[in-house]
Image: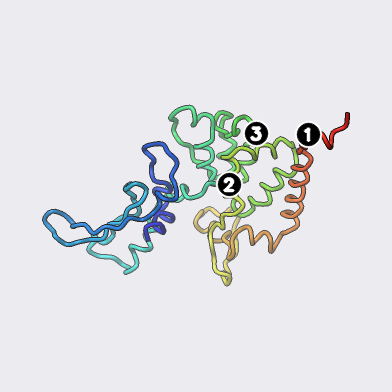
């Protein structure tokens, strides 16, 4: 339950590391204790801790409320009682997260975060706000890449085509660890789920209600499987072209036996 809450709450995706050392698997080990509720109340309660006893804030304590509409309100609050900012922390492919964590302006000092949810938001970003991943991507390519992240339903073929075509330097940018994490999340995160018998369709363009839009563009088996099932040609051709480019970029290794002269 501890790790389940930790993964879905979005409030603290990673415990704050005050000593600036990388967390190890052993730090995630759960430690169980029985403690008194307080000095006046001798009632014992289970206390579970991990990450060096770092406090984890998950959800509001709805048990203290006198009236609740639903017996499962405490459980449902894991998913419903969160702002967009809190939920955004879960995804490494969220454009707001990418800009505010990788943009040169935000890395140099404390600046007011910017919200990036649409293509228009990306167009209003300055060059210093666009993440170039160590000047590997130029501002134009960075702008395109961030725009792809604003459309989760179709971002997989767009991102693969981005690295398969155009400037070969784009493929070299994947040597950057931060960009690797973003692309990995964009490709393999399943996205919003909907049942296979969901019949609602888009009746207006654009869809103003973002929650409604997310439910309409959700998939039953994840975005990657959805692309494989409905449009595999773009995926396979892009992956093959990326592999071919990677092989062309391999300069080989010098050995006396295979070298002339």
State the SS at label 3: loop
Q: Which residue is mark 1?
A: 254
- Of marks 2 and 1, which one's residue comes earlier in the chain? 2
State the SS at label 1: loop
Q: Position of residue 164 (x, y in %)?
A: 73, 44
Tag 2: Cα neighbours inside 10 Å, few (<14), some, or many (≥20)? Answer: many
Q: Position of residue 222 (x, y in %)?
A: 59, 61
Q: Is residue 115 above or below residue 58?
A: above
- Is residue 11 rendered to the left or right of residue 188? left
Residue shown at the point (49%, 56%) measured from the top left: 211
Tag in front: 3 or 1: 1
Q: Position of residue 48 (x, y in %)?
A: 31, 56
Looking at the image, which residue sits at the far left?
40
Q: Which residue is mark 2?
A: 150
- Of marks 3 and 1, which one's residue comes earlier in the chain? 3
Q: Which residue is mark 3?
A: 137
């Amino acid at each position: 339950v501890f790790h389940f809450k930790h993964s879905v709450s979005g409030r603290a995706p990673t415990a704050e590391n005050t000593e600036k050392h990388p967390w190890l698997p052993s730090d995630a080990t759960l430690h169980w204790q029985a403690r008194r509720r307080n000095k006046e109340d001798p009632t014992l309660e289970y206390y579970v801790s991990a990450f060096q006893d770092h406090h984890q804030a998950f959800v509001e304590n709805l048990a203290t409320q006198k009236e609740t509409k639903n017996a499962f309100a405490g459980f449902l609050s894991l998913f419903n009682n969160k702002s967009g900012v809190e939920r955004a922390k879960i995804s490494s492919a969220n454009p707001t997260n990418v800009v505010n964590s990788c943009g040169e302006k935000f890395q140099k000092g404390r600046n007011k975060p910017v919200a990036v949810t649409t293509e228009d938001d990306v167009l209003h970003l300055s060059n210093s706000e666009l993440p170039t991943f160590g000047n590997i991507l130029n501002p134009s390519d960075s702008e395109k890449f961030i725009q792809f992240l604003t459309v989760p339903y179709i971002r997989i073929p767009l991102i693969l085509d981005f690295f398969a075509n155009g400037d070969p330097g784009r493929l070299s940018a994947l040597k950057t660890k931060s960009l690797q994490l973003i692309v990995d999340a964009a490709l393999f995160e399943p996205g919003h789920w909907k049942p296979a018998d969901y019949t609602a369709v888009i009746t207006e363009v654009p869809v103003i209600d973002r929650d409604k839009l997310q439910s309409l563009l959700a998939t039953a088996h994840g975005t990657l499987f959805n692309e494989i099932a409905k449009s595999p040609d773009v995926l396979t051709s892009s992956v093959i072209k990326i592999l071919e480019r990677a092989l062309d970029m391999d300069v080989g290794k010098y050995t006396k036996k295979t070298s002339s002269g």
